[in-house]
Image (cartoon, rainbow, N blue to C red):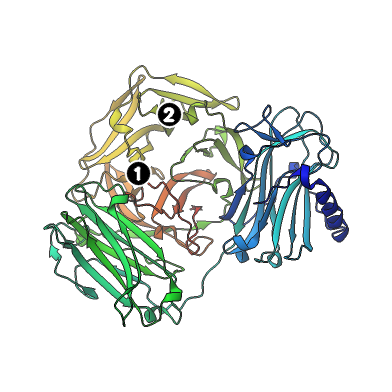
Amino acid sequence: MHLNCITNMKFKLVILFFSLLLSCKNKEAETAYTAKAEEMRSVALLYKEELPIEELEDLRISRDVFYSGKKALYYTPQMEFSAGFKVNFSKVSRIETCDSLEVNLKYFTKQKLNGLKVVWTIDDENGKNLSWSGSLIENNKVSTWADFRLGFKLDKKLANKNNVLNIYVWNPAKDEIWIDDFNFNLFDIYYEKQNDSNVNCNFYYDFESNKDIIKTECIKESEAHSGKMTCNLSDGEEYGITVKKPLYLFGNEVIKKLAASIWIYPKQKEHDLILTFSCKDKATGDFKFWQGKSTIDGAFELNKWTKLNSAVNLPFEKFNLDDEIEICIWNRGKTAILVDDLHIVFGEQPERKSEPNLIGNNASTTSLAAQQTLLYDTINTRFLSNFHPNDFILTAPFYQPQKGLESMVHIKNNRVQMHCYEAQKNSFNLVWETSNLNHPFLVKNNIFFAGDFDNDKTSEILIVNKQTLFWELYHFKNLSWELKTKGTNLFPSQWCNSKHINVSNVLYSNNKTVLLKCNAYGIETLSLIDGNWTIGEPKILPQGFEQKDTDFLLDWNNNSFLKLNTDWRFDVKLLTLVDHKLTIDKNIELTKNKKGLNPKYYEHTKLWTGHFISTKSKHLLVSYLNCANADYNGLNCTTIENNDMFPNGISFYH
């Protein structure tokens, strides 16, 4: 990133400005902020960059007026151009698919602005200007921080690696102004690698047979993740199974990526089991490539099945099509451990194959219920494009409850925003936000639930501090969040532990919100009665009904729920409540999203339901992310991995 230093480069910038103006006469495109940003059809973030204002030390910096951190950019009446960005497109992976540009900043001024603009230009490698666009900032308020957010479509002819992007603020009237949180984003369009549909690049090994497996001595009938057979290393054996495949199976070019996952069941502490990838030179026997991922680096609980994921970039320039790739299980720690359900993906695939639809330890328990398919909805989700799995999204009719539409409160570690759908604009609008770290929504160690807990026909957000177990109810009133009540008794500790993600808040009866938690005995309830949280008796489920403590229930329609089994990749079932008994009605499937992919193939998914768009139909909001770190069933995902063929995203279904 390049910072335009005004003190050293002001003269050059003035010359640059006039040259741009002359070469691009009549190309200027003014767009007032009050007209709102142009809707962009892309939802996948391709590249982002933020101006490191906190690191700047010169005359452009103000320490007295700022929005976040301790500094802001300050423009005195003597300054015409700002610090900004200079980005060579060659550093942006897959720039050819770039579809749109978004610029964001905060600004503060004490007077009416006169022609202040955010400018972005694109030059070729020789410095010749190819595009110039300026967007006018019109402030309706003074002496308060305001947002500037604007999006542009990007001409495909300009999106190539030889061009350079420049973004800066032009202050021709030389107004006094402060700017903070200056950043930009590039978004991409649908990109699909052409691939031979007849080539099988996905392989599954449940160890019920020994087909294609080398070193099968460890495969025995024992406790398994699925079926009856598993790779049992309980006696401290060092080496498990091996799978070997020649590269010519996957096309006439050497693949560049390889991914695999296994389910493991450690029985002893200090385990060190490694999923390895390797390739040997046939002539010398030396390794051309070796890489492994160990259980040491992740949280793998004893006596519990946990998935280990691994993906590698292959040094394809070292390989020939006749070379063989080996995927092995190496029990370096020589502790007792079980391994099951190995899944391997060779290359960058436009679509992953789903895992076997197995439930529990026996394939015969697979549900034979009918299938219901939810359709992808084209409603724009850009307002949630920066979602992270550690965020909270709370849904309830907080804003304008008379419309009956659920609002979305998005809580990040440093900012809270509330969005609500507006039919006239066919978009979700920002209706409230704060970045005040003292706000109760941003206090650390808090967890959140949404609903009508006190049965007064208004929606609240329940805040519970995991350490103190103190709790409070807030409702949205007079365009702000107000404390409604707080408890004198403590919140039950077992309902806000590290696995609180599996506590569901459901409109259970008479429109009152009751917290539900699944366990081996059935479904427990927690409700607010006379100001106290009361745990109900577990609801005993019918014989044969599959239930796990990793299940998550979502309210769907009258007397029906969606059950997400987080112990398996996107296993969602529709349950119906008849005579106080839950039965499985349908298996829920999803159609492909705008990128031509299906969220069910991602390692980490989260679901929310609500009347977000219309009171006549309920929508399912699905986030789908690639998790880079080892995690327990995708729940404790802390690091997001970018995958060109499986872009992270969030979509509506109905």
Which of disc 1 and disc 2 is earlier in sequence?
2
Which secondary structure, mark 2? strand
Q: As displayed, is residue 189 above or below residue 477?
A: below
Which secondary structure, mark 1? strand
Q: Which residue is mark 1?
A: 553
Please name the amino acid that badge 2 sits on: Leu
Q: Residues within 10 Å of mark 2 (few under 14, many from 20)?
A: many
Outermost residue to the top: 488
Q: Is residue 368 visible?
A: no
Residue 305, position in %: x, y? 24, 52
Question: Image point 66% across, 54% down: which residue?
Answer: 101
Which label sits on residue 462? Answer: 2
Please name the amino acid that badge 1 sits on: Leu
- Write down the quadrant of residue 236 in the picture: bottom left
Residue 367, position in %: x, y? 26, 58
Q: As displayed, is residue 176 above or below residue 313?
A: above
Give whichever of 474, 107 is nearer the camera. Answer: 107
Q: Is residue 12 visible?
A: yes
Question: Image point 24% across, 56% down: which residue?
Answer: 264
Left or right: residue 412 versus residue 301 is: right
Mark 2 vs mark 1: give the one in front.
2
- Write down the quadrant of residue 16 in the picture: bottom right
Residue 368, position in %: x, y? 27, 61
The CA span between labels 2 and 1 is 18 Å
Left or right: residue 319 versus residue 25 is: left
